[in-house]
Image: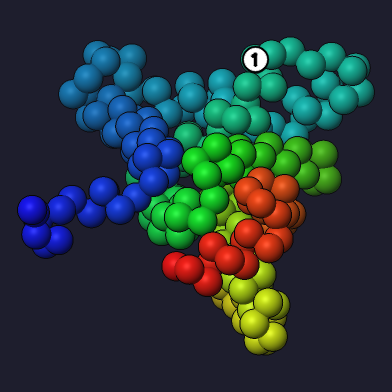
Amino acid sequence: MSSPHEESPFNALPPVVVGLALAIFGVEAAFQLGARGIVGGPGAVGWRLAAVQDYAVIGDVFDQMLALNVWPAEHLLRLVAYPFVHASFTQALFVIVFVLALGKWVGEVVSGWAVLAVFFGSAVVGALVFAWALDDPIPLIGGFPAAYGLIGAFTFLLWANLRAAGGPEGRAFLLIGFLMGIQLVFGLLFGGGKDWVADLAGFATGFVMSFVVTPGGWARVVERVRQR
């Protein structure tokens, strides 16, 4: 019998969460190695820029698609591909931390397919809100809208537990309030884009989707959260 101290920390993580984190890390690792000339030859230096051009969510592109009612597959692919393309190693690292931390908690309560549904559903809705509600020339990349969807699911589970226990339901929203506050402060001090709109839309999507993707409905949510 193995000692708990000898077990890998990844054993406690749902496989789908590990898979998402590894996919994000793998793409970023390829960019880093290519930029240093370790893999891919001279052309690898521009891999990140090429990925941004091919997979970023660009508002003007989606505005034209809506106006013409034409939906090319290569542009629809952007909605689910952009969470794996980041502007820097630091951005990718923060997203991986969010996915591992929140994905572990959510994945212990809901199924793997539900985690995937929340991740990609939040990414898609966040991108569409960003593209159609704003007139921002800066493209949207990075996994924060999808990660915020997991925060939304996490918030839902806390809220369900507090509601069932008769506790202060507002405490469930402390995390998203804190994160949005940090983004506001950084935006005021250092400037920033409007990608927080996509993040907030991702959070709302994850929260609402949790009503649907949680097996057994509301009563099962409360039961499983209390058993943890």
Q: Secondary structure at mark 1?
A: helix
Image-based side of 44 in relation to 215, left or right: left
Image-based side of 108 in relation to 197, left or right: left
Is 51 situated above or below 190? above
- The percent position of residue 80, horizontal first and vertical second, equals 60, 30
Image-based side of 151 in relation to 87, left or right: right
Quadrant of the image occupied by residue 179: bottom right
Quadrant of the image occupied by residue 75: top right
- The percent position of residue 16, horizontal first and vertical second, equals 43, 39
The image's colouring method is rainbow
Disc 1: which residue: 74
Is 54 situated above or below 205? above
Quadrant of the image occupied by residue 101: bottom left
Is 26 situated above or below 159? above
Residue placed most toward the observer, 154 or 218: 218
Residue located 65% across and 15% down the image: 74
Q: Residues within 10 Å of mark 1 (few under 14, many from 20)?
A: few
Residue 55 visible, this orientation: yes
